[in-house]
Amino acid sequence: MGTSRRMRFVHGQIAWMVATVLVLAVLGSLAYELFFVISLLGLLIVTELTAPISITPAWRRRLRWLILLGLLGFAYVVVRRILEIIPSGVL
């Protein structure tokens, strides 16, 4: 039973990421940072949509570390973008 739920999670995440690449390519906005941010958003959505009701398997607990790393990467992207926007004389 656990393997099918895990595979449902993996298939959902892969589908989200493929759809992200396709939409960004059609819009002409394919960039690594944008892909990363939208994929992280998809990871959070798929994680919540596939969350079990009563028991949390071990692989779901380890998923928290991946989400934490993703959020740290997101913070890096945001800080980098903010530093690009701020004029050089301000800091």
Image (cartoon, helix red, strand yellow):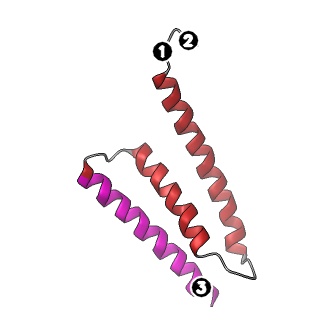
- Residue 44, given in percent of the width and then of the height, sits at 57, 61
Q: Tell me the amino acid under the disc marked 3.
A: Thr
Q: Residues within 10 Å of mark 3 (few under 14, many from 20)?
A: few
Question: x%, y% of residue 33?
Answer: 44, 43
Label 3, on which residue? 3
Quadrant showing the N terminus: bottom right
Q: Are marks 1 and 2 in contact (CB under 8 Å)?
A: yes
- Label 1 sits on a secondary structure element that is loop
CA gap between label 3 and label 1 equals 51 Å
Image coords of residue 7 (percent x, y) = 53, 80
11 vs 24, nearest the viewer:
24
* Residue at the outermost right position: 55
Q: Amino acid at mark 1?
A: Pro
Instruction: Look at mark 1 in the image and give the residue it sits on.
Output: 87
Q: Is residue 89 above or below residue 5?
A: above
Which stretch is magenta?
1-26
